[in-house]
Amino acid sequence: MPAFPDPDTRNDLAEDCRRCPALVEAREHISWGNGPLDADLVVVGEAPGAGDPGADRWRGGNWTGMAYTSRHSGRRIRELLAEAGYGPDACYFTNAVKCFPADGEGSNREPTPEERADCRPYLRREIEMVGPRAVVPTGKHATKSVLSLEGKRIESFLDSVLATVACPGLDTTVVPLLHPSYQDVWLSRLGYDADSYRAAIAETLAGIDASAGPGPEQ
């Protein structure tokens, strides 16, 4: 199991944010990015889920105030990247939308275009602050949000998985991954099992121009 992130690494970009009234009403906490500001990778999810307030530590970003700290997705993506050579010292974790988008029934809904746009300056600022070797969005919606910063679009998300996208405006490279919640569903469709997918992540990230940052941990 990966180590729970140090709360001191939370990167609060504002004391409060009230740009999106529906998100303000639904959230418990703003789910800020966390991790070292000199990380090799910026890992981007879509938005925090409802989480589990009864969990010991891995309650989810809506309750911890830190992105990718849920028992399922948070632990899973952190473990996957660590096994690919990018442990906690190499990854900064955040979301494209920082607050829980409630569906009114205790679960998630898809963030609206306006909510994505309201959060986009925070995401851009994080990427610029960290200056990562690569940005790793997880899932279709996170990938669309990241690429929109560069004015780019994708036709098929599955075709974009592990395909490097140069983003000179952000001074980095984007490498989309499957969302950890849906990884098992789609791996075989892409011709991978868990081991070969992890190896492909490591190989793809290692192949990015070394001048953009240090390589994976050995």
Image (spheres, grey):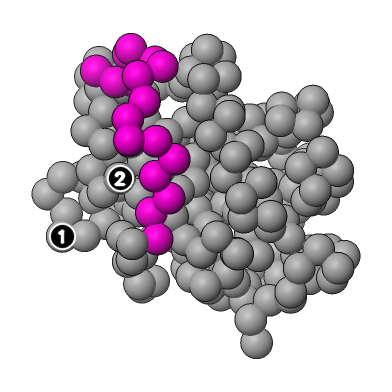
Residue at 40% in and 60% down: 9
Read off the magenta span: 9-25
Instruction: Name the residue tied to disc 1.
Output: 56
The answer to which of 98 and 184 lies nearer the viewer is 98
Within 10 angstroms of label 1, few (less than 14), some, or many (20 or more) residues? few
Number of numbered callouts drawn: 2
The answer to which of 11 and 178 lies nearer the viewer is 11
Magenta stretch holds residue 203: no
Instruction: Name the residue tied to disc 2.
Output: 65
The relative height of residue 182 versus residue 93 in the rendered view (above or below) is above
Q: Quadrant of the C terminus?
A: bottom right
The relative height of residue 154 versus residue 182 in the rendered view (above or below) is above
Magenta stretch holds residue 19: yes
Q: Are marks 1 and 2 in contact (CB under 8 Å)?
A: no
Q: Amino acid at mark 1?
A: Asp
The relative height of residue 55 versus residue 23 in the rendered view (above or below) is below
Residue at 23% in and 43% down: 63
Residue at 44% in and 40% down: 13
Percent x, y for residue 137?
Answer: 62, 45
Within 10 angstroms of label 2, few (less than 14), some, or many (20 or more) residues? many
Work out how far the residue at label 1 is from the one at label 2, CA to CA, in angstroms. Answer: 15 Å
Query: Could you say whether the residue bearing mark 1 is in a helix, strand or loop?
Result: loop
